Amino acid sequence: MSTGTEGGAPRDGGAPGDGETSGGGTSGDGGAVAGEKAGADGADFSEEEASRGQALFRQVWPLALGASAASLALSLALGLTSAGTGLIGAFGDAWAARVAGGAVTLVLLPMLLGLPFAARGRVVRARFGLVTQGWGGWAVDRLRGLLISLPLAAGALFAVYALAGTTRWWWAWAALGAAALTVLMSFLAPLVFEPLFNRFTPMEAGPLRESLLALAARDGVVVRDVLVADASRRTTALNAYVSGFGRTRRIVAYDTLLTTAEPREVELVVAHELGHVVHRDVLRGTVLGAVGAAAGVCVLAAVVSWRALLDAAGVDRFADPGSAWLLAAVAGVGEVLSGPLWRAVSRRVERRADVHALDLTAAPAAFAAMQRRLTVVNVGHPDPPRLLHLLLSTHPAPAERIRLARAWRPPTTEAEHAPKDRPPA
């Protein structure tokens, strides 16, 4: 029940990896093959509802894996041969021109290669009634993402190659820079990037707004406002999230959620998101991401200095900007290898937030109903194939979350009711 961006583009219900609806845990979790169980106990979802989720997933997961495989193949083809160096060299012999060429090609070529997968994913999801945006708006979103990604990539490459050309300790400074950028982006996302893709308006005064603010107060979470995002201009999918830090923190609900779900279900979605705040998941994730980025830079620096790889890429040393595609190839392999681990951590974090929502609201039946509604409306698969779930899913399967709600029991000790006693988050 969170949201995110990919290359600056909103995740509003594309194929996994091309924008995924994470509301209600359908984040890439929908779809299976014939003969699989339909839900938590076989009765939570009708045969038609389960079949729709299965059918959608059968069509989108090959697109997700195909897009990832194509991107990695491109990086390897250009990074482990002299083709990438030659491509960058076409921008000129000057150092700045080569760095700029690296940035442009690193951002533009994967985007162009991924467009057919993204477009096909949009077509598929439109057939299931999940898309409300026209092709023009879809293209504008992609362009916005490009305009965000390109300056970031250019800035990062200019910094890395400037350091690599001046000091042998460039990797240490680059690691610090990567960590700092990770932290900075976490703070800037809700203030700068989110408004580029959605319009946010304060939720009108009324019982729902008051109940959400009261829920946050009872949980010890300080929020600045309750906002409504105009997600309906892109999708019919449902979602809500809490974004920002400190004084910038706000509860955000999709307008589709408000017009489709019951008020109690909206409260439960928000209670889940408050769990992330209480457990400091965003802060921990930011710190972990910063540490991971720094460690990743150190590993990259060690690997890209291997003579065999430099020779394959057609460069004498990494400080040559022509090695940018070699850097991308090594980073791509690392991302593929580490992806399942990060998604496993994400599923564990999401499950903990589910438990928090149940403890806070003591409404397991309503929680199960909320999960069912989100899964049905977002056309998610109640219980996806195990292997694909482990590879692609950032959230527990809906069936698992419903089982969790049914197995939940009220906390039995005063310590387990800690929300009101701890300092405000």
Image (cartoon, rainbow, N blue to C red):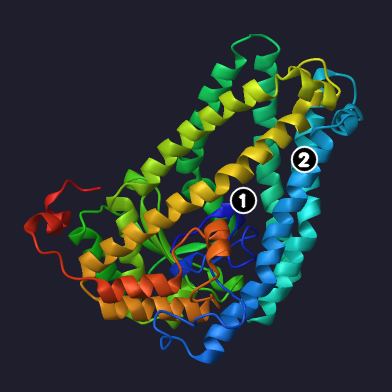
Q: Which residue is mark 2?
A: 75
Please provide percent x and percent y for residue 72. 74, 45
Residue density around tag 2, few if under 14, some if 14–19, many if 20 or more, within 10 Å: many
Q: Which residue is mark 1?
A: 8
Q: CA–CA distance between discs 1 and 2? A: 21 Å
Q: Amino acid at mark 1?
A: Gly
- Tell me: residue 261, above or below residue 180: below
Q: Amino acid at mark 2?
A: Ser
Determine the residue positioned at 46% across, 52% down: 344
Q: Nearer the viewer, mark 1 or mark 2?
A: 2
Residue 82 falls in image quadrant:
top right
Q: Quadrant of the N terminus?
A: bottom left
For the residue labelled by badge 1, is the local secondary structure a helix, a strand or a loop? loop
Residue situated furthest left in the rendering: 414
Q: From the viewer's perspective, is 365 left or right of 239?
A: left
Q: Is residue 9 visible?
A: yes
Please provide percent x and percent y for residue 3. 49, 59
Please provide percent x and percent y for residue 156. 65, 29
Please provide percent x and percent y for residue 168. 63, 9
Determine the residue positioned at 52% across, 55% down: 4
For the residue labelled by badge 2, is the local secondary structure a helix, a strand or a loop? helix
Q: Nearer the viewer, residue 415 or 41?
A: 41
Q: Nearer the viewer, residue 98 or 351?
A: 351
